[in-house]
């Protein structure tokens, strides 16, 4: 059984709060709460929320999941909270414009597999899965007024992204204030001891959540704020579903492998640290060997890709993805031999095909990829959003990016290669 001090050292590792005083206060509060729980003979109540704005979680989400896993390993009560109600608005924390609002039907569809994806990291037997529409949906207008009375408008307008919008003359919609209020009520409804989140959640957890808990007679939760965010496939901006620079946990092994291989060399260190859990000295040693030329960036990236695919799929799937990568990009063959084959019975738009076959997540993504010359038909770029494929053009190979291929054939089988 780990001591309180041992737990604090592990649980506070990798956290950052913008200033050392806040981190010191959170460390003291965590130690104090652990001691209280030890005396009471109960575990900490810990949670992290994940909004199903789209149907997939991505590698960036696993950073907070790994912290939840640490709490589980110390025997604490961990909740994986699906933000089925907060998703209707969407978190404005790191956005310079208001998010599109979703319908409950959208959210339900997106949330369907969230828990299953989370169990790639979390211990299923030790994870409580809840949905926040359970307590947010029954609130009436009088409840909202009562909860809102604990905050001032100035507190919300002081948030950096809102302040920036004011300076730039961009709109701030009233409903965007409700997000932090709803997330704060998540902490109240669960009587949370600890909430885990990323840097974009500092206000929601540290200010809104703790203030509402105190105002309603609860002990304020300890904020465990992860210090680093995972860069997306562009190597620059935090991995984000809305920006399209993410690596979904539901990616096919080949696609996941290829997306890791597309990462810029400069992010190898942080990926090894945040996804594989390497210690800073081990990362520093790898980066020094890369800088000296002792090891090649591409070989390092291939090992990283194999390990990541092994974590979220299997070692067998990783080996198959490696073979396919070699076949396409190292042997000069150009096209994988094992691509899926799909029948086409009548003329169909390229965008419709991409969406129907799940080669893209939406028509919007299909439009963006076509405009960026990221879609090819028989190795020729598709340069029109109205492009179609007819049975007379078959067989044909449709390609998205460098890793997604499908062979289109006539419905009756004629013309297959």
Image (cartoon, grey):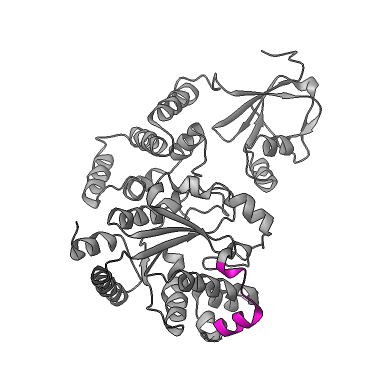
x, y percent for residue 248 = 51, 44
Q: Is residue 252 magenta?
A: no
* Image height of 125 relative to 39, above or below: above
* Magenta segment includes 145: yes
Magenta span of residues: 135-147
Q: Is residue 261 left or right of residue 20?
A: right
Which residue: 54% across, 75% down? 181
Q: Is residue 386 visible?
A: yes
Q: Quadrant of the C terminus?
A: top right
Which residue is most to the front? 41
Q: Toward the viewer: 120 or 401? A: 120
Residue 250 location, x and y as percent? 52, 41
- Can residue 173 be seen here? The reply is no
Identify the residue at image location x=33%, y=36%. Answer: 300
Chief secondary structure of the magenta span?
helix
Q: Position of residue 184 (x, y in %)?
A: 49, 73
**For this rendering, which residue is in front, 46 or 176?**
46
């Amino acid at each position: 059984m780990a001591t309180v001090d041992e737990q604090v050292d592990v649980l506070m590792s990798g956290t950052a709060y913008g200033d050392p005083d806040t981190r010191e206060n959170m460390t003291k509060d965590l130690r104090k709460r652990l001691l209280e729980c030890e005396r009471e003979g109960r575990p900490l109540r810990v949670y992290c929320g994940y909004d199903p704005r789209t149907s997939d979680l991505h590698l960036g989400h696993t950073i907070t999941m790994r912290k939840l896993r640490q709490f589980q390993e110390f025997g604490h009560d961990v909740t994986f909270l699906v933000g089925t109600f907060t998703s209707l608005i969407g978190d404005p924390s790191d956005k310079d414009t208001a998010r599109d609002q979703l319908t409950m039907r959208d959210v339900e569809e997106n949330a369907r597999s969230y828990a299953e994806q989370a169990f790639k990291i979390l211990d299923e037997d030790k994870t409580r899965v809840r949905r926040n529409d359970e307590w947010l949906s029954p609130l009436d207008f009088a409840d909202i007024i009562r909860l809102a009375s604990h905050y001032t408008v100035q507190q919300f307008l002081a948030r950096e992204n809102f302040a920036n919008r004011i300076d730039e003359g961009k709109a701030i919609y009233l409903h965007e204030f409700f997000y932090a209020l709803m997330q704060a009520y998540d902490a109240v409804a669960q009587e949370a001891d600890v909430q885990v989140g990323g840097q974009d959640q500092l206000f929601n957890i540290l200010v809104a959540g703790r203030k509402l808990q105190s105002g309603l007679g609860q002990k304020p939760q300890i904020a465990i704020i992860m210090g680093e965010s995972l860069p997306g496939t562009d190597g620059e901006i935090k991995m984000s579903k809305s920006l399209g620079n993410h690596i979904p946990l539901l990616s096919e092994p080949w696609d996941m492998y290829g997306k890791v291989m597309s990462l810029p060399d400069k992010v190898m260190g942080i990926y090894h640290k945040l996804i594989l859990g390497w210690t800073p000295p081990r990362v520093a040693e790898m980066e020094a060997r890369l800088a000296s030329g002792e090891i090649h960036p591409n070989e390092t990236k291939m090992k990283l890709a194999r390990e990541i695919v092994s974590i979220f799929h299997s070692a067998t799937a990783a080996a198959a993805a490696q073979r396919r990568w070699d076949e396409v990009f190292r042997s000069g063959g150009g096209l994988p031999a094992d691509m899926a084959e799909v029948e086409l019975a009548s003329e169909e738009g390229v965008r419709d095909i991409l969406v129907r076959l799940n080669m893209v997540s939406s028509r919007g993504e299909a439009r963006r990829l076509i405009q960026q010359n990221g879609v090819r038909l028989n190795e020729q770029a598709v340069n029109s959003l109205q492009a179609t494929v007819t049975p007379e053009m078959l067989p044909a190979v449709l390609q998205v990016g460098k890793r997604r291929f499908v062979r289109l054939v006539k419905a009756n089988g004629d013309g297959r290669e």
